[in-house]
Each structure stands twice: as structure tokens, then as C-alpha cells.
Image (tube, rainbow, N blue to C red):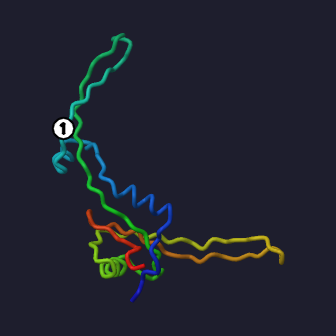
Amino acid sequence: MGFIIKPVVTEKMNAVTEKSSVDKTIVARNEKAAKAHNATAETRSYIVKNKRHADGLKKEKTVYSYVKPAQPKYGFIVKPEANKLEIKNEIEKLYNVTVIDVNTVRYAGKRQARYTKAGLVKGQKNAFKKAIVTIKAGEEIDFYSNI
């Protein structure tokens, strides 16, 4: 039905896309979480300085870390009546990608005023809804392919 109005290709949205498109190394909180993610063990040594030990007490700690694969995110301005399932289906049809998650944000219209020769002109920007779409790792959307 055409719920997507336009893709958001701004500097701020590109920063979100670039940040989410990089693999992240994450430290697991406990051994249970480490086993769930097939984490690798790493021993870190550190020195604890206190009143009893002037030169410091050496200790070791085992830390489990794993790599979280990148999941690229893209932003779209959508119609306010569109829900997440409709947005997901339309993006999968338009761009031939697998959508993992859709997050939506509603923005209120902002009041604006400017001074002109005719005096103070007041108005209001339109309210809109933005969808941030997470797609499968390894896939990407090229907005400039059909230009």
C-alpha cells in the first residue's frame, strides 16, 4: 500500500548505520552467558594497592569475551498509520533483504517562527513517524542504485 515515504539519509542516521555495521567484542558477565555465546577465556592480571601491601597485591581474573556480528540499521520516514509488520513486509519487497527488527519513533511537529520583511511568520513543521530497520548481517540497502 506504500507505507514508506522516503529513506532517511542524513549525517545523524549515517552515523547510526556506520556504528552498527562494525563487529563488536563483548565481555560476558558470567560463565553461563559465556557458554551461550561460545566465548573465549582470557586471563587478565592486575595489581591491588592497599595499606597492608605497600608495593601492591597481584591478582588474576578470567574474563570471557565474544564477538557480536554487525547488524546494519537503516532509517525510513513512514506513514503514521503504518505498523511494524507492514513496514517489514514492504522493505523486504522493495529492497530484497531480510528484516530482523523494526523500531518505530513518533516525532511531534515543532513550532517555528522566523522574522521576514512582512514581520513575524509563525508556523509548524509536520509530525512524522520514523522506522529504524535492522537487517540481516552481510546484507545492505543501496539507496543510490536506481538513480
Quadrant position of residue 44: top left
Residue at the spot of label 1: 41
User: x%, y% of residue 9?
Assistant: 47, 68
Q: Nearer the viewer, residue 141 or 47?
A: 141
Please, is residue 147 above or below residue 15 in the view?
Answer: below
Q: x, y (%) of residue 134?
A: 34, 66
The quadrant of the rendering that contains the C terminus is: bottom left
**Quadrant in which the N terminus appears:** bottom left
Residue drawn at x 39%, y 58% is 18
Residue drawn at the location 35% of the way across and 71% of the way down:
141
**Point 77% across, 76% down: residue:** 121
Please, is residue 29 above or below residue 36 in the view?
Answer: above
| Local crowd size for mark 1, using a 10 Å CA cut-off: few (<14), some (14–19), many (≥20) | some
**Amino acid at dot 1:** Ala
Relative to 114, does residue 12 appear above or below in the rendering? above
Please tell me which residue lies in front, 147 or 62.
Answer: 147
What secondary structure is found at the residue carrying circle 1? strand
For this orientation, the residue located farthest to the bottom is: 1
Could you say where residue 38 lies in the image, as x and y percent from the top left?
A: 16, 48
Foreground pick, 55 / 139: 139
Total residue callouts = 1
